């Protein structure tokens, strides 16, 4: 993959197209095949490979759990009841 010289680990350089490399690894395709994928398929493959990589480490799994927790927009009413708290909807 193309990289910037003299930067990164041990002077190997910084990879400037990590998403292409992820898609190639995830799909088992060549650079040309990855670049010819429809944009939505390319982005989905890149996202799935990124998530798969995060699931391999405890820190990554914690990060994904935190992301899922923070993305919730509805309160956990059962958890509130278990703690003895009352939930009142704004609509009431």
Image (cartoon, grey):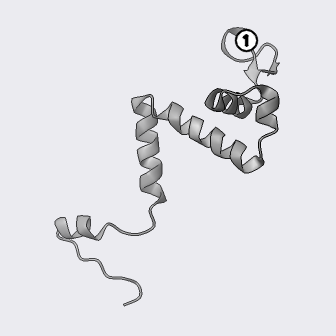
Q: Is residue 83 visible?
A: no
Quadrant of the rendering where the N terminus is positioned: top right
Q: Is residue 40 left or right of residue 32?
A: left
**Residue 41, image x, y percentages:** 70, 46
Residue placed most toward the observer, 77 or 90: 77
Q: Residue furthest bottom?
A: 92
**Residue 36, image x, y percentages:** 82, 38
Q: Residue at x 72, y 50 (%)?
A: 40
Label 1: how many residues lie within 10 Å, few (<14), some (14-19) or many (20+)? few
Q: Residue at x 64, y 26 (%)?
A: 25
Helix, strand or loop under label 1: loop
Q: Residue at x 64, y 40 (%)?
A: 45
Q: Residue furthest top?
A: 10
Q: Is residue 30 left or right of residue 47?
A: right
Name the residue tied to disc 1. Answer: 12
**Residue 10, image x, y percentages:** 68, 9
Quadrant of the rendering where the C terminus is positioned: bottom left
Q: Is residue 27 visible?
A: yes
Q: Residue at x 76, y 25 (%)?
A: 30
- Classify 7 as above or below 20: above
The quarter holding residue 82 reads bottom left
Residue placed most toward the observer, 64 or 28: 28
Tally the numbered discs: 1
The quarter holding residue 20 reads top right
């Amino acid at each position: 993959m193309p990289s910037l010289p003299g930067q990164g680990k041990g002077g190997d350089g910084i990879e400037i197209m990590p998403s292409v490399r992820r898609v190639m690894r995830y799909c088992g395709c060549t650079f040309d095949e990855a670049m010819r994928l429809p944009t939505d398929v390319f982005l989905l493959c890149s996202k799935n490979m990124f998530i798969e990589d995060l699931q391999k480490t405890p820190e990554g799994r914690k990060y994904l759990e935190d992301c899922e927790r923070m993305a919730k927009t509805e309160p956990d009413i059962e958890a509130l009841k278990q703690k003895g708290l009352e939930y009142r909807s704004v609509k009431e």
